[in-house]
Amino acid sequence: MAIQIPSRITFEGPDTVRKWGDAARLRREVEAMTFVQRETSVPVPTILEVYFDDHSDEYKCWILMERLPGSQLGTAWPEMDDNARSETIRQLRSYLEQIHHLRPAGAGVIGSVSGGAAFDY
């Protein structure tokens, strides 16, 4: 059984984020991010660089991506007026509808967006 490594995030300046974790999990995340970015208007960070070491059980694999502008919703929400909250809800609804309507390339496939293996851990 493989050792499961939770993800770790480091902020590397105002414009970039590095996410560390195991190679298999990060590969699937890159695939999913690329798919959502290509098929929707949902804001997805641009992937700047990746490093995968398939033989590592440590934090040696990473994704370097742009940091999207904005505040965390949990922090911003209490400060928002009703109009800002309504607009935020409208945007989130639009993003969720777009993601809900995405379809995999192969009918009946249960797996990653590239048709690869599915993991439920």
Image: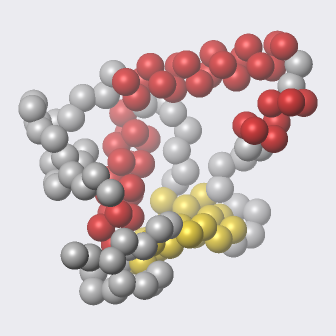
Write the residue at 77% across / 19% down.
85
Residue placed furthest toward the front: 1
On screen, 53 above or below 88? below
Q: How many labels does the image show?
A: 0
Relative to 82, residue 76 above or below: below
- Pinpoint residue 51: horizontal percent, then vertical percent: 40, 77
Give how far across and how far down residue 49 sits, in percent: 47, 70
Report if residue 90 is visible in the image: yes
Residue 92 x, y percent position in the rendering: 59, 24
Q: Nearer the viewer, residue 114 or 39?
A: 114
Does residue 100 appear to the left or right of 88 in the view shown? left
For residue 109, side relative to residue 85 (left or right): left
Tell which of 40 and 97 is nearer to you.
97
Along the line of sight, the residue nearer the viewer: 6 or 71: 6
Is residue 70 shown above or below 57? above
Q: For residue 108, what is the image quadrant?
A: top left
Q: In this view, does 109 lie to the left or right of 28?
A: left
